[in-house]
Image (cartoon, coloured by chain):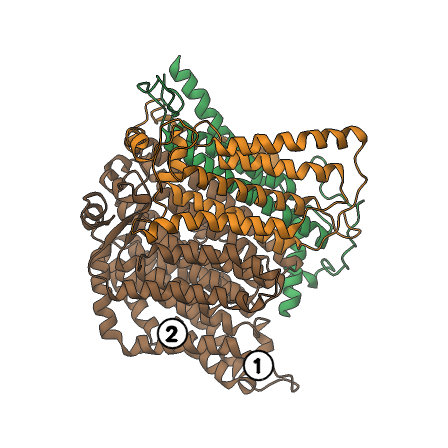
Amino acid sequence: MRNIATLLLLGGLSFLLLVITGGLLFGNPPMLIGQGIQQAAPTEVGAANIVTAVVLGYRGLDTLGELSILFAAATAGGLVLGSTRGRSGRPGGFILRTGVDLLFPLMLVAGLYVVMHGHLTPGGGFQGGVILAAAFFLPLLARPQESLDHTWLSVIEALAGSAFIALGLAALFEGRAFLTPLFDHGVLGALVSSGSLPLLYLAVGLKVGAELASLLVRLSADDEGAS
Amino acid sequence: MNWAIGLVMFVGAVGLSVIGIAGMLMSNHLFRMVLALAVAEAGANLLLILAGYRWDAAAPILLPGHSTQAMVDPVPQAMVLTAIVIGVGVQALALSLVIRVRQHYATLDMRVARQRMQDALDQAAGVVPPRSQEGPAGERPLPAPTRTIEAGGPHD
Amino acid sequence: MTDVTLAVVLPLLGAFLLPLTAHRGLHWLGMLLGPALLALAALLLFATWTAFESPYAIALGGFAPPLGITFYVDLLGLLFALAVPLTSLLLWPGGSDEAAIRQQSLTLLLAAALTGMALSGDLFNLYVFYELAAVASYGLAASSATGPAFVAAFRFLLISALGSVVTLLGIALIYFKTGTLNLAHLATLSERLADPQGLAAFAMLLIGFGVKAELFPVNAWVPEVYAATGKRVAALLAGLASKLAVLAVVRILLLVFPHDEARQLLLLLGTLGVLSGELAAWQARDVTRMLAWSSIGQLGVVLVAFSLPGKAGLIAGVTVAMHHLVVKSALFLLADRWGGAVDRLKGAATASPLGAALFVLFALSLLGLPPLPGFWSKYLVLSGLAEAGSGMQHLALGVILLGTVIEGGYLLRIITRLYAAPERDIVPPAHRFPNLFASGLLALLLVAGAILIDPLWQGLNTLAASATDTQVYVQTVLGGKGITR
């Protein structure tokens, strides 16, 4: 009975959605704002990666909201799980420990590279931040007893988030709108270009890295005796 | 040929969303509900990405010498980036709640957890639940959370 | 420096910095930071309100409107935005331990997100702020750290996340058909959305934003969360957060979907909400869940009011929404110690005469006793429905009247218990002072509303006139006249 109900629901829902999406034009989007952004972005923002120009420039407030959502999730996770939980488990074997030791600096470099080149190539603060978080989480898999220092994580969280807002407020104090990109655009495609965008992405990368690392640490910790 | 590719894409997006939504509505296993949520979000993100796709267009990155080429709409890509990060946060929070629910009620079955919650709320409010007049359901002491209790069979 | 974006940004900054005060000997700073920033945000919005001349838009990041995100500042948005810091200040969770600081951080995030929802003029930005408010409220819902709270918060999260997925699908549909996200730009393209696909997109957005607005099919989380969590959180979610979600729906309805079908859909779901909420409240036997179900019913009335076309609908909707904000927040505050079974309340009036008197005042206003503002708000909705005249509206009128009768039944049930003789000398607990103080302030606001009914009516008329004028919105944002920077 249950299976039949499931099938009916699945069928009905997908039929409905397919009918709705069936009439859509695929491959020829109207691009009313997309076109405008593509034309204006190189001169207005100066980032070679137009997605970055959208993420940090045109829709910068969305990115701030998104950082806040990650922060809210980490804070709520801390509220739910508490931060005084112990860690236990056997240390990893020789191969795991050595591999982690070798990987750690490489992942750090890769993460920072992806963050710093976000305005030129695919990638950026979010992707790089995830790599950074993984780099700091890996040693915990190899040596479960050693805990990451929560104090430092929360300091980085707070300061990186505040730096993003401070860059936005700096424009406001100059008499322009919140989150207006600062500084000169520089040469399109150069590492030091597109004004304050690399700084914003650095803040995003650190924030995302710290946020995800603290979430991972909290989720992987276990309570005294339970589970 | 193009319409076939479009059809496959739409079926993929709609299919993922529907599978995810159905999983969230039909499953009673807390962890599977979180997984279903992840699947549904993937479907919605795919549909969003499709909204900006253009035939014969390049990724929206300016390379020296290629500046005249048509590019896909960058806005949906930025939106999907945002939506993915939001999804990650929500799923992490959901998982931490699952951990806590399991510690408190020693179960991963939504029906059981919900029943226990209702009983606890009724008791705290001083309202006698109607069903306790028929049988002693919900009056049992809660078992201590241990590793051996696995809620929901493999076919649940 | 009276840029209203600061009202969104300052609470965010405070939320980021607040956890730092937990580590060092900075507890005094932590205690002050949140309330100070909220008060600053409220002052800023109030200054904008008093200096308000005509609607204007703020192009965030300095990018010309359809491309970048815009904030739209008009009286409707400012009214709801002003309510956010004031209410969060009134319902501020005190304390200075680690859990309390996290809860305060989440409250600041919620306030920032709700203010953003009131001001934002961009569809996807609305979604982002809505999600921020949602994630913050999951945390707040679980903040009492009991088993029931965790289960309730998880169910809330799942229902809300399902709504978000559906909203994203709706946004994707709209983007497919129009290629833009700016509400003013969408308003000029609204004919493109006047077909079944467009209506489907509206239904999806309605379901998504409706989760927090306690809309009929997606409100199963309401009684559990409000019963399992602290009553201040319940007041914040039922009183404040639901209103801002409604405002988001109203903005989308007015600008992007000015079609009759969309209004009919809102009317239908609102009517079902009234019916199901009031009936379930009648069945409930403890005060908290009675209030929770009845808040579903009253939000149904709010949605029905906003579904009425034109100025009359907007005036009725704003009145009902603001009235519910004040009354439901206060009732939840009063239910903090009286949340249990109705029968336990016998003799509560002897323990806390002021609390009981306040409860009666709010209950009577909720019912719609004539001199109180509740009467006027209900009167506006009912007369609007009677004038609008089609069969659907008359049905809604009948349902709301029936709902009022049921409401009278269960509220009187509580009131009679309050003034009954105590049983076996067990006197229910008196209220804590902060809750009594906060609800006393709200009662003063209510009485002031009853006395100042004339100037309020004038103000509402100008507010509604500018809010329903889509042309003004479009020209302000896209015409380049009212853009700052």
Secondary structure beneath disc 2? helix
Parent chain of label 1 = C
Parent chain of label 2 = C
User: Camera-side residue: B3 or C20?
Assistant: C20
Secondary structure beneath disc 1? loop
* Residue C77 spot, x, y in % from top left: 31, 57
What residue did someone put label 2 on?
A: C365
For the residues marked 1 and 2, what is the alpha-carbon distance in whole angstroms?
A: 23 Å
Labels 1 and 2: the sequence-earlier one:
2
What residue did someone put label 1 on?
A: C430
| Shade of chain B as shown in the rendered figure | green
**Chain coloured orange in this rendering:** A
- In contact (CB < 8 Å): disc 1 and disc 2: no
| Shade of chain C as shown in the rendered figure | brown
Name the amino acid type tagged 1. Ala
Name the amino acid type tagged 2. Ser
- Asked if residue B60 can be seen in this view, the reply is yes
